[in-house]
Image (cartoon, rainbow, N blue to C red):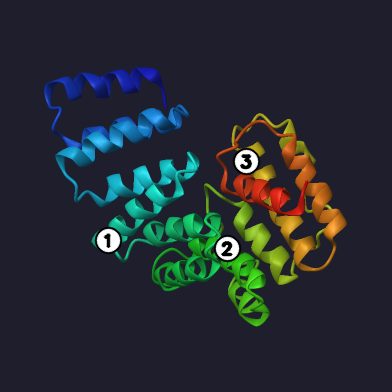
Amino acid sequence: MSKSKLTAIEEKLRLTPDDPRLWLAKGLELTALNSHYEAVEAYSWGLYWDGNQAELLLARGRRYISLRRWPEALADLAAAARLEPEKFDNWYYQGVTLALLGDYQKAAAAFELCLPIARAGDESYLSPAAVWLWLLYTRLGRREEAAAAVAQVTPETKELTPAPSYKKIALLYKGAAAPDDFIDESQLTSDDPRALLYYITETYHLANYYYANGNVETSNELLRKLKLIDKHNYAFAYMLARQDMERRGL
């Protein structure tokens, strides 16, 4: 992603400003540049020209999550799901938003709708849905359902390419991966731009694993480590970690 590509899209928009696909493309480029407010504006212009573009609603809803504007995110994602109920992401990000809003029952219901979509399509999507369901079910005291959710993930399950941490976390929650040495500390200094995001995600879920299994002290230590990180503060795991820290007075 580059500013030159963004400039090229803006040139096309000057000629055809009523093309919602170009506004979507502009928003995606701005998102890649971490310009989240500007991305929301681009998606909103696209929806001005065509309010029934599910892809624009999904994209804007995701940016609203990053900006912690969760009621607006939920409205967009619910609208996207009405237009495209078979799309995994429309339910997945609703589940994320509802979890951040603290409505664990409705969040779990959204992620439950993700599972048959993943099974019928790309099995790599099973892991993220299963991880969220384990987190939510344990907080709701539904331990058997939590175990059943992650039981679907095995060492042979296909890994989700942009988010490989979820399979690793699912195996941890399942008891098929040991918590010792679960975190790769080299991710903190890696040249891979996504390595720190993986570190945040894995550290948070390890903290959640310890907390759910009664080891509050170790869980708190891990959350305090995340508190020191000043990048990727829009990551779902980081936002959940901050909420947990506030609840525990950390």
Label 1 or label 3, whichever comes before in sequence order: 1
Residue 84 is labelled as: 1
Which residue appears at 47% of the width and 68% of the height?
A: 106
Which residue appears at 12% of the width and 22% of the height?
A: 15
Residue for badge 3:
197
**Placement of the N terminus among the 4 image quadrants:** top left
- As helix, strand or loop, the secondary structure at mark 3 comes to helix
Residue for badge 2:
132
Which residue appears at 42% of the width and 71% of the height?
A: 113
Q: Residues within 10 Å of mark 1 (few under 14, many from 20)?
A: some
- Please name the amino acid that badge 1 sits on: Glu
Label 3 or label 2, whichever comes before in sequence order: 2
- Please name the amino acid that badge 3 sits on: Leu
Q: Position of residue 65 (x, y in %)?
A: 46, 45
Marks 1/2: CA–CA distance: 22 Å
Label 1 or label 2, whichever comes before in sequence order: 1
- Please name the amino acid that badge 2 sits on: Trp
- The answer to whether residue 180 of the structure is visible from this angle is no
- As helix, strand or loop, the secondary structure at mark 1 comes to loop
Marks 3/2: CA–CA distance: 17 Å
- The answer to whether residue 88 of the structure is visible from this angle is yes
Q: Which residue is at the front of the view, 155 or 163?
A: 163
